[in-house]
Image (spheres, rainbow, N blue to C red):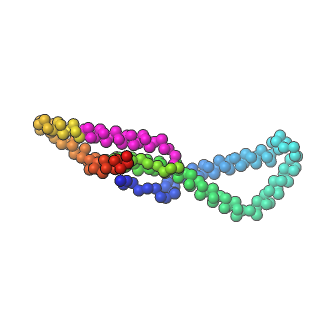
Amino acid sequence: MSSIPKRRKKVIDVATQSKIATETFVQILLFLALVAFIIYIQPFVTIFSKFAAVHHQQLVEELLSINLSKWPLFLLIFVFMAVLNVLYSHKIVGPIYKLGMVIKSYTGRDLRQRMTLRKNDYFKEIIPLVNGLRDVWIEDLSALAKDVQEMKAQNPSQELSQKLDHMEAIIQQYEIQAADLSKADQQDN
């Protein structure tokens, strides 16, 4: 039924997914900087701790010397965070990509495609809206086709007949896909 291929790639839109990953990483760095600021910088040291600032400075020096030997671990954590960001951003970018593909299908007069998303994707509330729009278009096209046939049966003038033929040609462009549409909808139900 579906003419739009399923999403299989994790990186759909490099620019958007990179922007989401960068913003997330910056937020994490800001959070870490804020925590470090509160823990190690005066006057916060004396406000939030009963230890003197000298003790905190010694702790920072020890922490930095330990952390310098752990750079491969930090690199591994960074790569892990990058992978998680790609997976997370896929849940946002994927539905937007799918919506674009469905709209592209509809503008190509192919109403066979129904909007579907994967189980863990965001924006599921747009599914009934897009499918409802599609169903309304199908009903309207069917009613319009019926009206055109009724008007043609009444022996219209040549000018009106030409306009009806034009309308019928437009409707038939949709109806080419509609043969599969009714079968697919019956299978869905």
Residue occupying image coordinates x 52% and y 57%: 10
The relative height of residue 46 versus residue 6 in the rendered view (above or below) is above
Count of numbered marks: 0
Residue occupying image coordinates x 66% and y 61%: 76
Give the magenta part as a residue range.
Answer: 121-144
Residue occupying image coordinates x 18% and y 42%: 165
- Compare residues 139 and 23 and report the one nearer the observer: 139
Task: Give residue 166's quadrant in the image.
Answer: top left
Q: Position of residue 5 (x, y in %)?
A: 41, 56
Q: Is residue 122 magenta?
A: yes
Res. 143 visible in picture: yes
The relative height of residue 78 versus residue 182 in the rendered view (above or below) is below
Q: Position of residue 49 (x, y in %)?
A: 84, 43
- In the image: residue 134, left or right of residue 34: left
Task: Give residue 153's quadrant in the image.
Answer: top left
Q: Is residue 108 magenta?
A: no
- In the image: residue 78, left or right of residue 87: right
Residue occupying image coordinates x 34% and y 47%: 185
Res. 110 visible in picture: no
Q: Position of residue 152 (x, y in %)?
A: 15, 38
Q: Position of residue 32 (x, y in %)?
A: 71, 49
Kindly report the secondary structure that dominates the magenta region of the rendered protein. Answer: helix
